[in-house]
Image (tube, grey):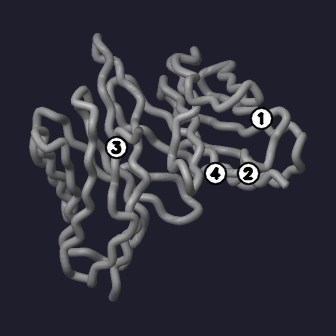
Amino acid sequence: DAGVIQSPRHEVTEMGQEVTLRCKPISGHDYLFWYRQTMMRGLELLIYFNNNVPIDDSGMPEDRFSAKMPNASFSTLKIQPSEPRDSAVYFCASSRTDKNIQYFGAGTRLSVL
Amino acid sequence: DQQVKQNSPSLSVQEGRISILNCDYTNSMFDYFLWYKKYPAEGPTFLISISSIKDKNEDGRFTVFLNKSAKHLSLHIVPSQPGDSAVYFCAASARFRGGSQGNLIFGKGTKLSVKP
């Protein structure tokens, strides 16, 4: 079975540009999570969805960040405008209601110059 | 304030010996705990979990122990192998009322190096 698929794997952009990260969760999973990993803060939850509905976005750092889940098989995390301090690895994860184990994608390494 | 703490950033162990990774938590509402392993340039992968109704769970070379009174859990790897070298994350969650799952709160990780 395919795991969680994230694209792109690497993104290099200039400050001020819009960045869109993509995630395809595991089929049949009804929870989707977006995380950011930095050296300083470790792995922190940004937002999560249940059945495509955002449940908790309290981890989203600023209004520059937005996330959508238009259907059960696709989600995006958008940063507009991007800033150098947004540079990090962004992970997407998914899970099933009956099993509280999250399965992670390989991550997107974002560098904002 | 960190609700899940892994106080050792790194641990070095000789191949064949036991590796013990520790994790402390502060929120008494946490009732489910997990360990993840992460290799460079990959996402975290689930390793083993334990519910708060148990104090031990074993899966092959990996055993997780939970001490609720001390709010402490540990992961034992016996025997350690060079392929176990990775960053290990402890995570905890509290189920919402009604049984739906809550967020996972992660520790900052411990980098394990197993020397041949």
Tell me, for residue B51, which label it has, or none: none
Mark 2 sits on what residue? A110
B35, B74: nearer the viewer: B74
Cα separation between marks 2 and 4: 6 Å
Cα separation between marks 1 and 4: 13 Å
Cα separation between marks 1 and 3: 28 Å
Front position among marks 3 and 4? 3
Q: Secondary structure at mark 1?
A: strand
Verify CB contact (< 8 Å) between mark 2 and mark 4.
Answer: yes
Q: How many marks?
A: 4
Tell me, for residue B4, which label it has, or none: 3
- For the residue marked with disc 4, what is the amino acid? Val
- A110 with respect to A4 (left or right): right
Mark 1 sits on what residue? A79
In the rendered image, the vertical position of residue A81 relative to residue B20, given as above or below: above
Front position among marks 2 and 3? 3
Location of the N terminus of chain B (image quadrant)? top left
A106, A46: nearer the viewer: A46
- For the residue marked with disc 1, what is the amino acid? Ile
Q: Earlier in the sequence, mark 2 or mark 1?
A: 1
- A56 with respect to A71 (left or right): left
